[in-house]
Image: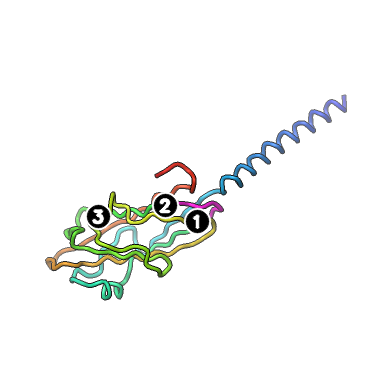
Amino acid sequence: MKRIIGVILLCAIVGVGAYFGTLYLDKLKKGGEVNVTVTFDDSETYVIPSIEKMNKESALKEWPYIIHVENSGSGKGLYQIIITDIEKSTIKRENLEYSLYLDDKEITSGKLKDIKDDILYVGEIEGNKKQEYKLYIWVINEIEKESNYEYKLKFNTIKSGGPGF
């Protein structure tokens, strides 16, 4: 009788160990978990600091919109940076240009009106890494003095190799 109980107990221990072992191996095979956190230096919405016509050189002397992205998981994450105009903005995108920097290196720039589906940038972040974005937006045409442009950024994140956005 003791032998039967011992064999049953041994089978249960081996079964549970095999279950958790395959879970661990599956997790390693899939690249681990992705846990992306996004923080903004100011607030989630931002108003451009100047409504005067500028060139890129003078715009880069203005204060940027700073965003920190951190992946505390071990897997690689993919994300989209989505820019949305706030309804009360009176300056239209055709009057604006932008420049986006990742860790102090310019990664994209152009006219704000040319952004497709509000997707400013598609990027990736490795596990246990941090990134810093700086976004500059400036006016390229003469506009009324009482005008403003306010926008919001949003991040859509998925695991690399997972289902699409």
Q: Quadrant of the C terminus?
A: top left
Q: Classify 10 Å Cα crowding around label 3: few (below 14), some (14-19), many (20 and above).
A: some
Q: Quadrant of the N terminus?
A: top right
- Numbered range of the magenta stretch: 71-79
* Closer mark to the observer between disc 1 and disc 2: 2
| First along the sequence among labels 2 and 3 | 2
Residue denoted by label 1 = 71
Residue depicted at 19% across the width and 55% down the height: 88
Residue extending farthest left: 144
* Closer mark to the observer between disc 2 and disc 3: 2
Residue depicted at 27% across the width and 62% down the height: 110
Give the amino acid at mark 1: Asn
Instruction: Give the Cα distance between marks 3 and 1.
Output: 27 Å
Give the amino acid at mark 3: Asp
Q: Nearer the viewer, residue 83 or 164?
A: 164
Q: Nearer the viewer, residue 27 or 154?
A: 27
